[in-house]
Amino acid sequence: MKKFYLLPSLLALSFLLMGMSKPIEKETLATPQVQKSVERKTHYTKPHAGIYLDYQRPDNLQIDDRLELQLNFKVRDQAEQLQIEVSVSEALLLESGSKFEFETVINKFNSVTVVATGLKEGSARINVGATILVAGRYQSRSFSIPVIVGEPTQSKSTVTGVVISKPGYRVDEAQGVVSMPAVETSE
Amino acid sequence: MKFNYLIKLAILCLFASLVSCGGSGGSSNPVTAIGSCTLGTGTDLSVSGTIKFERIPLQSSGALNFNAITSQPANAIQVEAVCNSVIAATTTDDNGLYTLSLPSGTQGVFIRAKAQMIKTGIPSWNVEIKNSSQSSGLLFALDGSPFNLEGLDVTRNLLATAGNVGSSYPNNAARAAAPFAILDTIYKSMQLVLSVEPNAVFPALDVIWSDDNEDGTYYTNNQINILGSTVDTDEFDEHVIAHEWGHYYQDAFSRDNSVGGSHTLRDILDIRVAFSEGFGNAYSAMVTGNTIYKDSQGLSSGFSFDVESNNCINKGWFSECSVQSVLYDFFDAINDDVFSLGFDEIHGVMTSNVPTSSSLTSIFSFINHFKNLTSINAAAVDNLLAVQTIDSITDDYATGVSDGGYIIGSTDVFPIYDTRAFPLTDVCSTGDNISAEEVYGLGVSRFIRFTAPSSGNYRFTANWTSGLNVSDPDMYLFRNGTIVAAGQSVVNRSESFVSNLVAGSEYILEVLEYTYVNLDVPYNRSASGAINKTCFTVSRAPI
């Protein structure tokens, strides 16, 4: 359960330092099951365009399974049109169209159905770019929908602290770095 | 021993062949050899050079401009000479230059530029860019190739490339520039503070990034998380990074009671969120010197707005757009207002007044003290506020401030700080301004301000009187802006907690209907049967 407050650490700290406030009454502490499981971190996010996406998180797919996912877009700005562009990562095959366009109506949902098939095991993504035209300026917002195909496992090889797990990067746990190659000159 | 070495060599050869397939047109070095260096015993020689990174600038739309890549110096970063282990270290200057002294005769040494800025003493800082995926928590480093020192000084220049091919990122290349581009924006962000507080001590900051990071761009608890997935890359989005660093600034140097969450410029926000986010937006323009906030989306789109613009859609003290407009007008030299202050006065109020106020952080607790500075024309402040339909602010608690541009829904959000005596009836939380999931709208939380009549333990209780049939009230008790106690049970229609109060101390009691901001079950204010107003009677009793 996620919540907005970074609370309990502050409570504990204030309790220890001030010695005069107890954060939660004894009866409640004795029966923690009636308390919410509070997300302690507050996330301060970046501003975004007034485009919202609502969808039902897809279940895991098996290879050759077909996914039909309805994406519901809502726009809160006085936009002239809404453009949708859909792509999928390589574990999926996109079988529906990839580009859609709507005349926008504020706070009314515009729906798109994406159809994709599981191609191979892996953690896949349905990537969605939504763009509105507001007062002559294009404003975009990106979304990424996770899809699991099969039961993927992460593989990596390790020899004495050197891990090769991804092209272009070398993980050197002994030296505490992820090493990346430089373009090097000597003049 | 020899067997291990051969295995390592074989892996390195394999890896080198992999990375040589990628890159952005330069001649990338193969992965550096490990454990094959011999330290010389001769006189010291100079090894010097520049550390640079490629920056992909943004177009006016906010989209990445792959056709205008530049190389920029990596300032103030750690550079090491590695011969099996670190044998010398230094920091780059403002031109990305470094110089190290190494003994002649050393064979197989290489230069490593770490994605870290660290300075001890006064001022001080420690910023590290760490990996969020494979072996998470490890520092990024840019490695040159091994070389020998044979009696002459040498030059070794390292360039961190963006890793693009045209306008895309191939899977087999490192995006080496990203950690250094992020550091560059953070370095600029720090300079604005150092310009007015040269002895600033910056708490350690971790930045989490990887080229597949899809966890969002956000600040939390001395950590900035930055998107790297090609769905939305943020490493070159200077306004975005400076915005998040602005949250770090508020946390480190001031106080921020914001509850965070999602937000747009048109949202009608909780006063704490509006100020926190508006400050971040204004700060991004101050740092970059560019009023057009730009955020690339995917590899060909963007999002942008003008921080300087006064044309906010929902003007008012609940709008991050209004906050950013006012704050930036104080700062800038653009001739549309009488202010051209730079950051000095803003920093002074943020560090001296905002964190010591008994109120919660908001435009009220900032403006009230800002207006009282001897260098400030208070009437001119009022004029700027009036443009945003904000009445004159005369205290930290919005006393006398009207709703301005706010269109009242089912629930009146006034008074912003309720000072009625306990028990208070009709303390009403509203879902009217929950515009979308994770948006903490104005009026969800209601604030009760009181002074403790005597020291001792008190029970605070909120009992439902009307509204949602299944109701989950919560309460938080603040003293000097710090939460000292809370009630967060899931008991239907009721909440209660006990806290010790100090006689004469001022407290803020926050009361809310949790249903409106429960992210597990997002609230839809427009759904059939939605009840956007839930009210409680709030009492306080000594025990």
Image (tube, helix red, strand yellow):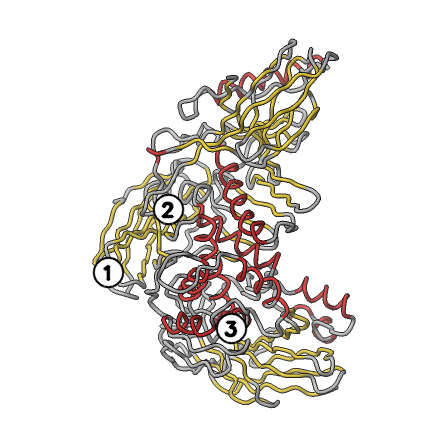
Report whether mark 2 lies on the same chain as mark 3: yes
Please state the chain letter of the residue tagged with numbered disc 1 in the rendered image.
A
What type is the residue that disc 3 sits on?
Phe
Amino acid type, callout 2 = Gln
The residues bearing labels 1 and 2 have C-alpha atoms spaced at a distance of: 20 Å
Residue displayed at 38% across by 80% down: B408
**Residue B499 location, quadrant:** bottom right
Location of residue B337 in the rendering, given as x and y in whole percent from the top left corner:
38, 64
Residue at numbered disc 2? B297
The local crowd at label 1, few if under 14, some if 14 to 19, many if 20 or more residues have their Cα within 10 Å, is many
Disc 2 + disc 3, Cβ < 8 Å: no
Instruction: Give SS at disc 3.
Output: helix
Quarter of the rendering containing residue B229? top left
Indicate the chain on which mark 3 is placed. B
Circles 1, 2 touching at the beta carbon (< 8 Å): no
Write down the residue under mark 1. A104
